[in-house]
Image: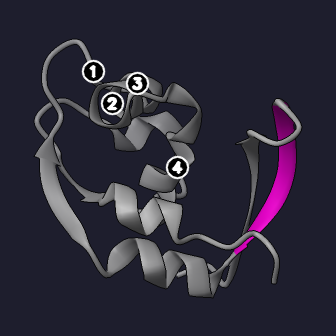
């Protein structure tokens, strides 16, 4: 598991994308309250579509990578794969200040 993860995230306060490190503490927060989701036809290789479907926000697809320890980009999101999905509460509890 990565100890730090540099990711482009959407900052609501600035209304723009920023680069941020998401530390191991935040990865643990994401992984502690999850459900499973099977990737259906039409969403394979599209974490943005999965995030939009699950959370109503395609800009937070990066939380799926972190939760599942994905390191190989969109290739990890193949048809019918079961992935872990963090709860919205877990996402709200993230702290980008470490």
Single out the mark in the foreground, 2 or 3.
Answer: 2
Q: Classify residue 58 as left or right of residue 33.
A: right
The single residue placed furthest to the top in the displayed view is 42
Residue shown at 54%/57% (left/top)?
Answer: 71
Q: Nearer the viewer, residue 91 or 44?
A: 91
Q: Earlier in the sequence, mark 1 or mark 4?
A: 1
- Marks 4/3 in contact by CB < 8 Å: the verdict is no
Q: Are marks 2 and 3 in contact (CB under 8 Å)?
A: yes
How far apart in space, not on screen, are marks 2 and 3 (Cα)? 7 Å
- Separation of marks 4 and 2 at Cα, in angstroms: 17 Å
Q: Disc 1 vs disc 4: Cβ atoms closer than 8 Å?
A: no
Span shown in magenta:
16-22
Q: Which of the two residues, 88 or 58, is positioned nearer the viewer here? A: 88
Residue 68 shows in the view: no
Mark 1 touching mark 2, by CB under 8 A?
A: yes
What crowding class fits label 3: few (fewer than 14 Cα within 10 Å), some (14-19), or many (20 or more)? some
Q: Choose the circle earlier in sequence order: 1 or 2.
A: 1
Label 1: few (<14), some (14–19) or many (≥20) C-alpha neighbours in 10 Å: some
């Amino acid at each position: 598991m990565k100890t730090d993860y540099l990711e482009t995230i959407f900052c609501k306060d600035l209304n723009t994308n920023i680069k941020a490190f998401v530390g191991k503490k935040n990865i643990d927060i994401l992984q502690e309250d999850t459900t499973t989701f099977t990737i259906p036809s039409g969403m394979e290789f599209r974490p943005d579509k999965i995030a939009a479907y699950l959370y109503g926000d395609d800009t937070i697809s990066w939380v799926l990578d972190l939760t599942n320890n994905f390191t190989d980009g969109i290739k990890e999101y193949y048809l019918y794969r079961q992935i872990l999905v963090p709860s919205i509460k877990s996402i709200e509890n993230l702290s980008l200040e470490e």
